[in-house]
Image: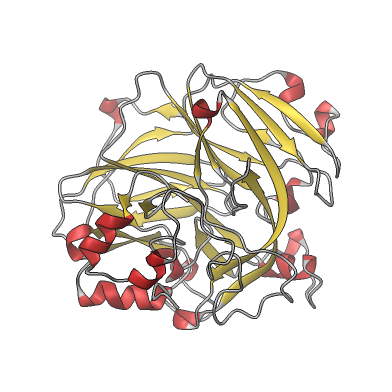
Amino acid sequence: MTDRIGAPGTGISRREFLAASGGVGTALLAGCTAGGRQSATNPTLGDPPANVSGSGGKLPYTSPPEVVQVDDQGGKVTLSTQQCRHAVHPKETMGGPIELPQVWAFKADDGPASVPGPILRTTEGNDMEVTLDNTDGMRPHTVHFHGSQKTWKNDGVPTTTGIQVEPGEKHTYSIPANVPGTHFYHCHYQTHRHIDMGMYGILRVDPKGYEPADKEYFMTVKEWDSRLNRMMAGGDAQYSPRDRNPDVFTINGKSAPRSFHPEDGSPIIVDKGDTVRVHFVNGGYMSHPLHTHNHRFEVIEHDGGVIPEVARYDQDVTNVAPAERRVIEFTADADPGIYLLHCHKVNHVMNGDSYPGGMLGAIVYREAMDSDIFGQLMEYAGYDGK
């Protein structure tokens, strides 16, 4: 794991987090290995999280998504498939626990499997070789990349290319980084099922001369009908995509309050005066109007297309349709505190019948981390070292 706290991107370090939070979560952080990936015995990843019934201990748990700098790997990355369990929110607080007993996850190289999948980041002009490794798979898969002008055979659609990666096989796709922006990738075999089982992620192509913001984060939202995951795990559930009725709502795979967890979740951690850039991607099948409390933002990019400055305006809600990508930018100029970021279809901000929960995150100022209310949120999120 990296030494960053917060949503995937450029958050603060663990040392900074501990200093700002007055030691909240010290016991949990003490169990991390500096500079390495999180241990398989960590209770939030390898072993069943507290208060989660699980599916007999047969499948490993997913990890939070990581950012993979593909340029640093010579333009090559391997995406492997893995069956996992997914702890959406493992505690009994705020309507939990919530678990998807089976998901189909991607992992990059020797990294952990995650839902959403790894965030693949490259630079315009630095084309990628993406190998889909289905060696340990149990069904065919492909990978289709939005926002790349590619050759026909690299489109990742089995029906029109004749290429699908069977169990036990590998296949390498050539993906040009010729459309700068934030994009979406997913399995295109039996798409209606495989995306809903977790096979999706973000591709980021930085334009040449890209100037990053002070803080930059990636956030994928998705709604789930857990009957599908329970049915695929062999549970007593019946599901049809024609009768899809979502009951789980996530940001980067987690529901509130787990979404506030500084390692497993995706808080947007800022300092007063920061320029903050957030890359939103919708991995689901419903539109989600995303709202920021007490911060006005501009949409600077839409599906990889840069919005001209003359067409930008201040707003606090942006609707993100299925597979859409929107990049927003704002200045952290509010009274330092804790402010919500959430879907404004308010029934999506629930865990079952419990409100609040679901597709709910937070913009957290470092100055507010030593407050009693932040400590209470960390307790709800399960950030207590137990």
Could you tell whether 125 is left or right of 28 in the image? Answer: right
Q: Position of residue 103 (x, y in %)?
A: 69, 60
At a point 27% along the width and 27% down the height, the residue shown is: 309
At a point 20% along the width and 69% down the height, the residue shown is: 370
Question: Measured along the vertical axis of the image, is residue 241 above or below residue 211?
Answer: below
The mark total stands at 0
Question: Measured along the vertical axis of the image, is residue 86 above or below residue 310?
Answer: below
> Who is closer to the viewer here, 289 or 236?
236
Residue 262 in sight? yes
At a point 39% along the width and 66% down the height, the residue shown is: 30
Could you tell whether 108 is left or right of 291 in the image? Answer: right
> Who is closer to the viewer here, 61 or 28?
28
Question: Measured along the vertical axis of the image, is residue 374 above or below residue 298?
Answer: below
Q: Position of residue 187 (x, y in %)?
A: 71, 42
Q: Position of residue 338 (x, y in %)?
A: 25, 64
Q: Position of residue 77 (x, y in %)?
A: 62, 32
